[in-house]
Amino acid sequence: MLETITLESAIKLSAPLAKKLFNDKLKPIVSGKISQYFKNKSDNSIFEKESVKYISWATGQCSTINTIAFPNTPKKLEALYIPLKVIDEKGSEIIINAEADIFENDNKVLVNDTAGMGKSTLSKRVFLNTLQNQNYIPVFIELRQLEKQPIAQQIAAKFGVNTDNPSKFLNQLPLVYLFDGLDEVSAEDKNYIIKEIRKFIDQLDDPKMLITSRLESYLSEFYDFTRYTIEPLVEEEAFSLISKYDPKGAISKKLIAGIQRSSDRGLKEFLSTPLYVSLLFCAYRHKTVIPQKKHLFYSQVYEALFESHDLSKEVNFVRPKHSNLDSSEFHVLLRRLGFWCLKNGGKIEFQKDELEIVIQEIISSTNGINTSAVNFVKDLTTTVPLFLKEGSSLRWSHKSLMEYFSSMFICNDAKDKQQSLLLHFYQSKEWSTYKNIFSLCADIDFSPLRASVVKQLLEDFINYYETNYQNITNKRIKFTDIEERIGLTFGKNYGFKIFELNTSNSLKFTDESFWGDGNPDVHAVKNIYKASDNEVSQMITNLPGRNGLIHGITVLNRESMIINILKYKCPQLVLNKDKDKDKTNFREVLLNSAIKQNKLYIVSDIPTELINNSKYFHIINRLLSGFDEVALDYNGVKIELNKINEDSSNGIDQLIGELG
């Protein structure tokens, strides 16, 4: 059985180390370079007391982990942590184990990835590693908890110091800053917090700083950070994590055996994400069925939490609900709460009174359900523990749970407003924040997404197909290649440059500026496409014999997000190009072509551009498809669009027939 440890106990255990760190790292400079901030012994005493208190709290917070498998029963992070591998845009890897230093190559690090990849857990591991080395004192900040005040002022206050120049004070301290969950900041506060972080960075002298976030458009503000993504778990790592959840093996061995027998590719993909491994274990313990789709994971987890509140107890233990609601009624309120949070900037954290007010408003407008907000909130943290208690605040145990229930609201409750809601999110400037919503809605009920967002996408593609590359009339260019180029460039903009090896060495790919707006190529691509608010993906590809490198820059738009869903939901819409049968070595051809090295090429449909020459048109397609992009098929799209126009209900109207 995994040991449970309260946050209070973890903080208490951390006090001796916090005291030692203060004495070793901070006390020696109290009478030196920071003495000006202390007018008397009382100020010194407050500094020591608050510093030790903060370091103890942060250490306790980072040495424990709350997981959906054991809600509101914190476990030691060491007992459940699987070393995660991060990889930067240059291909450099770091395994974040107990000895790793994520700052070994760069002082400013940004870890961005999709939901559930373990960003917060990684931040805690980095905190513990920094603590263990005792060269710096780590400062752990959950960004959603920041107030609308200067960040330097808020951090200085944690150390008991109130000064007119907090950044100058902090500059004197040996600190490492770990800013976790930028994507979890509410939409109304996000611009302010981002500007404050940027200001804070610029006020410090090359600080060691880690920021974690989902991949969203605002990350362009952190152009001087080295960007890492988290490598997906391999099967052995997923099995290791499952075994950690159940050391005795009563459940874990059966679950692992069931996975090994399964031939479902989708299940294997879910195993690559730590969150879904946790959800899978939670769901399987309740019901020995392995769910095959994302929303089924969440549904089965909800059932598990509702019917068996404590997964550390026997499976059949069911605790009465304070709200006296059944599973269906409770789910209705959760769906509405989830959507309320989504509508209000993705809010995931509340003060208890604040949450009760929101719940009461929802209950008051929901006929047929009778309960009190106080009891419902009590259930959310005890008998159906989808919320975690952290001090005086309550929050969703994971942002993706809020997104699941809000997606269920859109698909089950919004009725005739489903399509307009989905189009609203798709057309929003913040479209990238809704990626998980679109993915979940596509799984839960594809019909409204198909009749709204997919329809608009297909119409836009038809228009793009019929108005672009019309001037490419060279008969030596195959029509199929033109068709593929149109598909590859729809919803995506590209630039690329070929470097000679000796030139690439001088460019110093290890420099942070190469991968951000400090690189004039990146800046040019973003400027040409007016894409400052969009996501930019970059890739380096070796040319044969290591004679050179290709640097590719892709600006992704909202269309790409939906096309990635269509790849699996509607494979008939994807242009069928068998790349494996194409033996053309585009790298070798490019190296020996008239395409100039060290020149930025912007992919366009201008006939006079060298990359649109008949000799190189096909080769450039191979280069673009190397970005792992797919092209839509014009004929397939026209057929599907006609079907949607003829029957947007996706067969429902036909099934109902005259009864409707």
Image (spheres, rainbow, N blue to C red):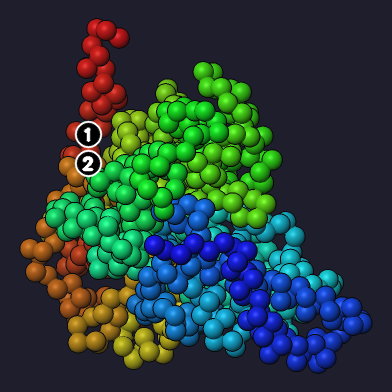
Residue type at tag 1:
Glu
SS class, disc 2: loop
Relative placement, left or right, of 602 versus 369 is left
Q: CA distance from mark 1 to mark 2?
A: 9 Å
Q: Position of residue 210 (x, y in %)?
A: 54, 72
Check disc 2 and report the residue beneath it.
570
Between discs 1 and 2, the one toward the N terminus: 2
Residue 602 rendering spot, x and y as whole percentages: 36, 65
Crowding at dot 2, Cα within 10 Å, few <14 / some 14-19 / many 20+, comes out as: few
Horizontal and vertical percent position of residue 544: 19, 83
Q: From the viewer's perspective, is residue 603 above or below residue 353? A: below
Which residue is denoted by mark 1 in the rendering?
640
- Which SS class for mark 1? helix
Whether pointer 1 and pointer 2 mark residues with C-beta atoms closer than 8 Å, the reply is yes
From where the camera sits, is residue 550 visible? yes
The amino acid type, in three-letter code, at marker 2 is: Cys
Position of residue 161 in the picture relative to residue 115 (left or right): right
Q: Quadrant of the C terminus?
A: top left
Q: Residue at x 28, y 84 (%)?
A: 548
Quarter in which the N terminus is drawn:
bottom left
**Closer to us: mark 1 or mark 2?**
2
Residue nearest the viewer, comparing 430 with 267: 267
